[in-house]
Image (cartoon, rainbow, N blue to C red):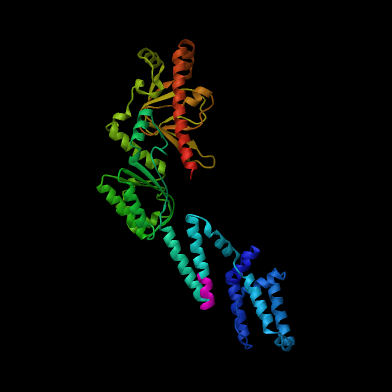
Amino acid sequence: MSSVAIDNIKGTRHDSKRELLGQGIGNIIASFFGALFAAGSIPRSIANIKAGGRNKVSGAFCSLLILIIFVSLAPVIGKIPLSIFAAMVIYVGINLFDRPTLRLIKALHTPGKVRRDVFAILVVNIGVAIITVSVNLIWAVIIGLAISTVYFIIKMGTSVIRREYTADMVCSNKVRNRQQIAHLHENKSKIKVFELQGPIFFGSADRLAHILEAKMTDATYCVLDMKQITEIDSTGSNILVRLHKMFERQNKFLLISHIHANHSLWEFLEISGLKQEIPDDRFYLSTDLALEWAEDQLLDQLYEGSARRHYELGDLDVFEDFSTDELEKIEALLEKDIFKKDEMLIKEGDTDRDLYILTRGSVSVKMSLPFSSAERRLFTFDAGVVFGEMALLDGKPRSANVQAEEVSEVYRLSFSSFSNMLDQEPKIAAKLVKNIALVLSDRLRARSNELRFMVDY
């Protein structure tokens, strides 16, 4: 404790094992001379610091000086009035007052949660001080640690939910058409995401279960974002299994993100039995993938499964308000392609400027990582959207790879055909560019709203 006090003053860090070994050896040697055992002393250490001592030599010199004084001047010291010693003790005691604790007393007028935390810290500090004076230091430390531990458990057990949101606030990185987005917004309350933090343990797990049960009354899909979960004990594991079974009986789904085979908690979840109770398809590498799955389930219900997977050109946002004659002229310029699963549509760095119209299937945009051979998925295009418009408009090389996630049907408008359209059918070309701009505007606005929500936290 004396070393910690000096560390706080000097901004250093002591070696506890070395200090204790040295003190123990010193006490053993002192016993051979009939000396009383001693320990580090905070008052002596602080007095040494204030006198200019900055290293261990000063401590040794202080000991030698005291020894010389007591050996040679003991009779003189005995004549010093006790009132002098009393004044010295009072002075040292005043200097030992913990200034941070005094600042906490001043902060008691702060309203809200901060005031409660300040009060709890003061109770521990003052309680330890009273027990130190009335009983002894060892019991004071033990009781102080016990109180602090109980308070920590209570505080951590209040709630592990950092924030919650519905699918309209933050959607997945799957790009969809306006009709799909409108349907998801109408059913936003059916998908709820809960970002968790800290440990899920006996002090917080049961409260988490009560909160989720209350908040999932109108929702169907519960996504637990466990990216910031540091620990799960057996109680926490059992609570998650209980939630999964309860939701299953209610035809609801519990999805868990950021817990995977390489996660530090994965092995414990297997040992605890959680992995045996919750299917593998309920665990996702990211919250984005979990959201995407939940959104797909909602859209499958709207479009009766695969019916939403195929679109006619007239159904697409990019051809909104086009007449039948205009659509026929556009269709004459398009080239139809079918891509197999995992087949590459666009390669990063390609210099073509074609526009792609996805009428069936889905494709993902992936970017190569600069310091590894791996790729990162940026987003996925669902049937009913266009992509490749950036190169069409600005003429720069492709910025990412585009790969088919399943068998996909794509109509391609080459840049040469688009240039001919500009010359021969400028009104149709202008309408197409306008609709592309509106699609891009919708995507940008959606991302802006998500960013605004995320920045709040």
Where is 64 relative to 256, above or below?
below
Above or below, 431 against 199 in this view is above
Taking the view exactly as shown, the residue that stands out farthest to the left is 249
Q: Quadrant of residue 9?
A: bottom right
Query: Where is residue 66 drawn, in percent x and y?
Result: 70, 81
Image position of 42 with respect to 276: above or below: below
Quarter location, residue 242: bottom left
Nearest the eye: 60 or 276: 60
Give the quadrant of residue 295: top left
**For residue 130: magenta?**
yes
Q: Which residues are magenta?
A: 127-135
Q: Is residue 371 above or below residue 263?
A: above
Q: Residue at x 52, y 78 (%)?
A: 134
Q: Position of residue 347 (x, y in %)?
A: 48, 30
Nearest the eye: 310 or 34: 34
Q: Quadrant of the N terminus?
A: bottom right
Please indicate, yes or no, whether residue 352 appears anywhere in the rendered image: no
173 left or right, relative to 5 = left
**Image spot of residue 227 (x, y percent):** 44, 49
Residue drawn at the location 44% of the way across and 26% of the way down: 439
Question: Can residue 149 be found in the magenta stretch?
Answer: no
Q: Main secondary structure of the magenta part?
A: helix
Residue 368 makes an appearance in the image: yes
The residue lying at 47 percent from left, 10 percent from top is: 424
Residue 34 in picture, x, y percent from top left: 62, 88
Number of numbered tags placed on the structure image: 0
- Name, please, the residue furthest toward the top: 424
